């Protein structure tokens, strides 16, 4: 996410630091590079023009040019301008004063509306709401079936409708009545899409909007389509009046042009981003965190929140006690790897770390997810006694473990070496130093 833009902007700042002193000339050169970086990231040209103009006004002032650390001030100015462009502050979902809250999901065909409806339903359920879904796409039976399958997978209710209900308005009206009668406080309405915007589609959506009086009309767009997504969002807003945007496939978009353009062009906030295929891969959009991630500062807050949602606190506290008492076994090592796997793809987690100092290339690491599977298999092939005391694992035991796990003796040796190093590292981190105390508070798996 934003990798290409992030790399180019960090290069600009590195070049500025290399100048030693900031001047009007090298600042102009930096602004030209920033302009090119934004355009190559597929940011809308009007947004780029305003962005550069705003930075120029703030960065070319005497106060910045004569400052003791002018480059840091320029980084701050770019950060602030990125946040402003992305939306200043996080935009939360608006709820109706009296339930059920109706939320319309709109967008072009193929943008990921139906999957996003399921993801949003799951997110709402995890955050204290009780959603009901309904598909009013009467043109594609497969779309309604798809939502039914998703509802079953995430174990949340859907209004299927009756054979007599053949119009979107009828389905929506019945679904609202169903949600009220069953105590569901949010109704998610997955609407029909088209390959392109047409009058019939907009007329149908406007009628639905008038009937439902939704608190939110969320436009779903594929981030990979760049400026096409921005153009479609703008057109939907002019003709329908959207209240927010959800960008899908953000994990595969290295440029980020749609995210950086859509707020400025539509004047409507980006509320969620899809960051994977799984139903839990939907994240609220935080402009400040994204700006800092673009500038290589990482997104540690999101990482901490992800850990706190996933990791069992009692288990983390017990693991901390074991580390302090030097009781961290191979079984614990395996369990911690399983905990990390629950957090999502490792490359995604590494991308949230600050790209500074010795870990600045962390996001570029290629992680073999199968390695965790091999480690788990090796540990599972050990006896309880071997897991409790790795020192008894001699040559004969290593050969038996390798055979039982479908691996090699070399891989078993490598695991035991990694375990010994991890045990040593985590023992030092769980000590009384400043870093150990901070990590202990976060309850991070593998870091306690």
Image (spheres, rainbow, N blue to C red):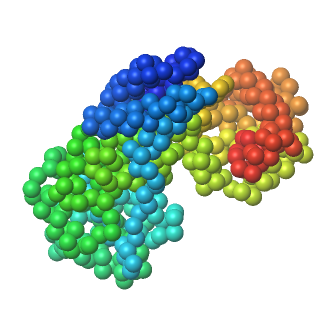
How many numbered callouts?
Answer: 0
Left or right of 314, for residue 124: left
Name the residue at 26% across, 77% down: 174
Q: Looking at the picture, tell me which residue is in the foreground, 253 or 75.
A: 75
> At 32% from the left edge and 38% from the top edge, which residue is drawn?
50
Q: Is residue 360 above or below residue 15?
A: below
Relative depth, front residue between 131 and 84: 84
> Could you tell whether 235 is left or right of 156 in the image?
left
Residue farthest to the bottom? 181
Residue lying at the far front of the rendered structure:
62
Horizontal side of 313 relative to 366 (left or right) equals: right
Q: Nearer the viewer, residue 344 or 358?
A: 358
Residue 260 place in picture, x, y as percent: 37, 40
Query: Is 131 on the left-hand or right-hand side of 240?
Result: right
The spot of residue 369 in percent (x, y) is 57, 33
| Residue drawn 46% across the image and 32% down it | 61
The C terminus sits in image quarter: top right
Which residue is nearer to you in this view: 88 or 434? 88
Quarter of the rendering occupied by the N terminus: top left
Image quadrant where residue 94 sits: bottom left
Percent across and percent down for residue 343 are 58, 46
Q: Would residue 96 be visible to someone looking at this image?
A: yes
Spot the residue most to the left.
199
Tell me: residue 148, above or below residue 67.
below
Q: Residue at x 24, y 76 (%)?
A: 173
* Residue 419 x/y as whole percent: 77, 32
Rendered position, 250 above or below 179: above
Q: Is residue 162 visible?
A: no
């Amino acid at each position: 996410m934003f990798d290409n833009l992030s790399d180019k902007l960090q290069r600009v700042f590195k070049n500025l630091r290399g100048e030693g002193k900031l001047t009007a000339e090298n600042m102009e050169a930096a602004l030209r590079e920033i302009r090119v970086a934004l355009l190559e990231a597929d940011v809308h040209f009007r947004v780029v023009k305003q962005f550069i103009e705003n930075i120029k006004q703030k960065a070319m002032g005497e106060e910045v040019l004569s400052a003791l650390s002018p480059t840091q001030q320029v980084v701050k100015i770019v950060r602030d301008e990125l946040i402003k462009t992305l939306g200043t502050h996080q935009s939360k979902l608006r709820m109706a004063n009296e339930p059920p809250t109706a939320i319309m999901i709109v967008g072009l065909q193929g943008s990921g509306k139906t999957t996003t409806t399921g993801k949003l339903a799951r997110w709402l359920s995890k955050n204290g709401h009780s959603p009901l879904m309904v598909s009013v796409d009467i043109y594609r039976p497969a779309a309604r079936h798809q939502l039914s399958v998703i509802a079953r997978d995430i174990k949340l209710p859907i209004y299927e409708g009756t054979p007599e209900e053949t119009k979107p308005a009828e389905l929506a009206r019945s679904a609202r009545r169903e949600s009220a009668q069953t105590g569901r406080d949010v109704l998610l309405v997955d609407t029909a899409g088209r390959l392109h915007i047409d009058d019939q589609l907009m007329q149908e959506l406007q009628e639905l909007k008038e009937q439902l009086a939704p608190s939110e009309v969320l436009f779903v767009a594929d981030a990979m389509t760049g400026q096409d997504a921005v153009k479609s969002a703008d057109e939907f807003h002019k003709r329908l009046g959207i209240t927010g945007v959800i960008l899908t496939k953000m994990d595969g978009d290295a440029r980020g042009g749609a995210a950086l353009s859509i707020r400025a062009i539509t004047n409507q906030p980006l509320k969620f981003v899809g960051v994977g295929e799984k139903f839990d891969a939907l994240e609220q959009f935080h402009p400040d965190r994204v700006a800092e991630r673009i500038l290589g500062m990482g997104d540690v807050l999101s990482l901490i929140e992800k850990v706190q949602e996933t990791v069992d606190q009692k288990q983390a506290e017990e693991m901390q006690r074991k580390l302090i008492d030097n009781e961290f076994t191979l079984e614990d090592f395996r369990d911690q790897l399983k905990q990390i796997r629950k957090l999502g793809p490792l490359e995604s987690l590494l991308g949230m770390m600050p790209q500074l100092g010795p870990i600045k290339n962390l996001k570029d690491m290629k992680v073999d997810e199968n390695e965790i599977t091999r480690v788990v298999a090796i540990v599972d092939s050990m006896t309880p006694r071997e897991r409790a005391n790795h020192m008894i694992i001699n040559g004969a035991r290593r050969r038996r473990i390798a055979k039982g796990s479908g691996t090699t003796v070399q891989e078993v040796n490598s695991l035991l070496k990694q375990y010994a190093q991890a045990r040593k590292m985590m023992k030092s981190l769980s000590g009384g130093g400043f870093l150990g105390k901070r990590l202990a508070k976060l309850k991070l798996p593998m870091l306690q």
